[in-house]
RNA sequence: CCAGACGGCCGGGCAGCCGCUGUCGUGAUCCAAUCACGAUGGAGGAAAGUCCGGGCUCCACGGAACAACGGUGCCGGCUAACGGCCGGCGGGGGCGACCCCAGGGAUAGUGCCACAGAAAACAAACCGCCCGCGCGCGCAAGCCCGCAGGCAAGGGUGAAACGGUGCGGUAAGAGCGCACCGCGCGACCGGUAACGGUCGCGGCAGGGUAAACCCCACCGGGAGCAAGACCGAAUAGGGGUGGCCGGCGGCGUGAGCAAUCAUGGCCGCAGGGAUGUUUCGGCCCGCCGCCCGGGUUGGUCGCGCGAGGUGCGCAGCAAUGCGCAUCCCAGAGGAAUGGCUGCCCCGUGCGGCAACGCACGGACAAAACCCGGCUUACAGGCCGUCUGGUAUU
RNA sequence: GGACCUGUAGCUCAGCUGGAUAGAGCGUUGCCCUCCGAAGGCAAAGGUCGCACGUUCGAAUCGUGUCAGGUCCG
């Protein structure tokens, strides 16, 4: 069963969003993770691969009624365990905020797997740049509808 | 104040917004389960390397001993145990506080010690030294050569040459004798012991290497939480059983001492079936019901009250032990413990007389069953004791 | 969690067992050859033997510790 996440955008959140779109306090749970190594391999084999400062992204379209699933990878080349953990957490947080912003704007994203691969500078790039990168990724994978707000896949 | 030695401790703080996760409470849909809200907890001194030792679990095994293999190695103590720690002994280093040491056995045996050197381990004799004899030279002292002996002091080689120094002694020499030192043996004294001291005896045997083999003493069963326990879907397969159907031979398997019996396991022949009409080839030949066990994805437990933390007291030089009081203090699972921001703190640089302002930086490194150690990495800081200088009194 | 392996010249490796000279190939540099280059020939340079401590008369080699890289098993 598809996981249902209801967001009630309050007036306060809207006003804050309009003033400063890059606040780091948008309500919303992180996306479900990719459970299997096979999913990672499939995304690597058939997904679209793009490189950004601080991360490499692989997106694989699944089906519009499936939620967005997030996979995170940090190899030993990135650094020791502390650096790898920090890189993964920054990527997860950036993805969570970007997805929540789309929901707040009443344009939730669905229907693809997103694999984020940490790079050696993932912990060093400004967090705002990571968020902009994730927003750009979501727009590419799931273009926002025109002015009328597109209803969610689930009522 | 400077330089240094040793021991112990800390490892940024506060707040805001948004998240993750454990526990508890309340509520919601019918229980399960999930969700919402609230409260509360949520990485380290090394969590690391995985170098040792245990707990725990399973497997194996009469106890135990021997052998093999591996480890440890001065003495005493501490400890659940240790290769750890504490205290001492011996040796070495430092002016000193203090630091370092795999530190049992070389008269149980075997092996090795290159080059050099006469000789590298039952000692031996290259250059040499000395007595005697002979030939020759020389006025003589003496010298050259040869023979037969004595010697191991001196030279030379080496990392190391069969005790060292001095005196006596001698033809020259030699523990040949003596004194001191070293070594060995014995007795006594001190000490639990390692060991130390004193006295006496022995003229000296026994070079080094055991981080070469080895000997001696002591220790060690193996594997590891992916241990292990439980639940267990769909599909396929296994075993048992009941009903229906089923031809022959060979092989295999099982039972039995054997004859033999059983066997829808395999192969061949025959027969049947399905896909399109015939031939050929390939494919299939049991079906249904019930029960049982194994087992993959997955789930639950193991899983945190413990050789536990803190404080005080007592015993002990100490490691540590005992007693009392008090506290509950992480439990993830593609893997939580976070993201962002502000202020403060510390350091450096710049501006400034100063208050201060601005910029940059704040280490190493993250649980994965738990505990005791060891080792390694680490910005900066705090406390205590002591040593050597310098200055003042 | 467990079991192992390898660190030697710029690169790939030998030497380690059994201790005493640190070597080979490629590469680099110089010279010769050629009108020039390649090939070839001659010669040379190039080493904390991963690091530290120790054993020994003597350590790349033996011992211990440590660091780095890599492999395998469940």
Image (spheres, coloured by chain):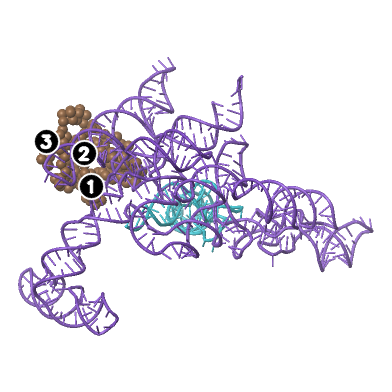
Chain colours: A brown, B purple, C cyan
- The residue to which callout 3 is attached is A149
Element at label 1: loop
Q: Residues within 10 Å of mark 1 (few under 14, many from 20)?
A: some
For the residue pair B307 and B380, the one nearer the viewer reads as: B307
Residue A91 location (% of width, % of height): 27, 40
Residue A154 location (% of width, % of height): 12, 42
Q: Residue at x 16, y 39 (%)?
A: A5
Element at label 2: loop
Q: Which of labels 2 and 1 is toward the front?
A: 2
Element at label 3: loop
Q: Residues within 10 Å of mark 2 (few under 14, many from 20)?
A: few
- The residue to which callout 1 is attached is A34
- Tell me if I can see residue A131 in this picture: yes
Q: Residue at x 15, y 29 (%)?
A: A11
Q: Which of labels 3 and 2 is toward the front?
A: 2
Q: Quadrant of residue B104?
A: bottom right
Left or right? Give the position of B168 relative to A85. right
Residue B136 location (% of width, % of height): 89, 65
> Which badge, 2 or 1, is on the more N-terminal residue?
2
- Tell me if I can see residue A44 in this picture: no
Res A44 label? none
**Chain to which the residue tagged by mark 2 belongs:** A
Q: Residue at x 11, y 35 (%)?
A: A149
**Chain to which the residue tagged by mark 1 belongs:** A
The Cα atoms of the two marked residues, 2 and 1, are separated by 15 Å
């Amino acid at each position: 069963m598809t996981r249902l996440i209801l967001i009630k955008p309050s007036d306060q959140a809207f006003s804050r969003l309009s003033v400063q779109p890059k606040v780091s306090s948008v309500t919303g749970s992180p996306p479900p993770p990719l459970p299997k190594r096979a999913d990672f391999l499939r995304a690597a084999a058939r997904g679209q691969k793009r490189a950004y400062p601080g991360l490499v992204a692989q997106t694989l379209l699944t089906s519009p009624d499936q939620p967005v699933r997030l996979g995170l990878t940090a190899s030993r080349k990135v650094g020791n365990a502390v650096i790898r953990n920090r890189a993964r957490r920054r990527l997860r947080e950036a993805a969570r905020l970007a997805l929540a912003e789309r929901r707040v704007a009443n344009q939730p994203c669905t229907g693809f797997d997103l694999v984020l691969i940490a790079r050696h500078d993932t912990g060093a790039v400004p967090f705002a740049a990571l968020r902009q990168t994730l927003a750009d990724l979501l727009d590419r994978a799931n273009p926002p509808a025109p002015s009328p707000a597109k209803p969610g896949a689930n009522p």
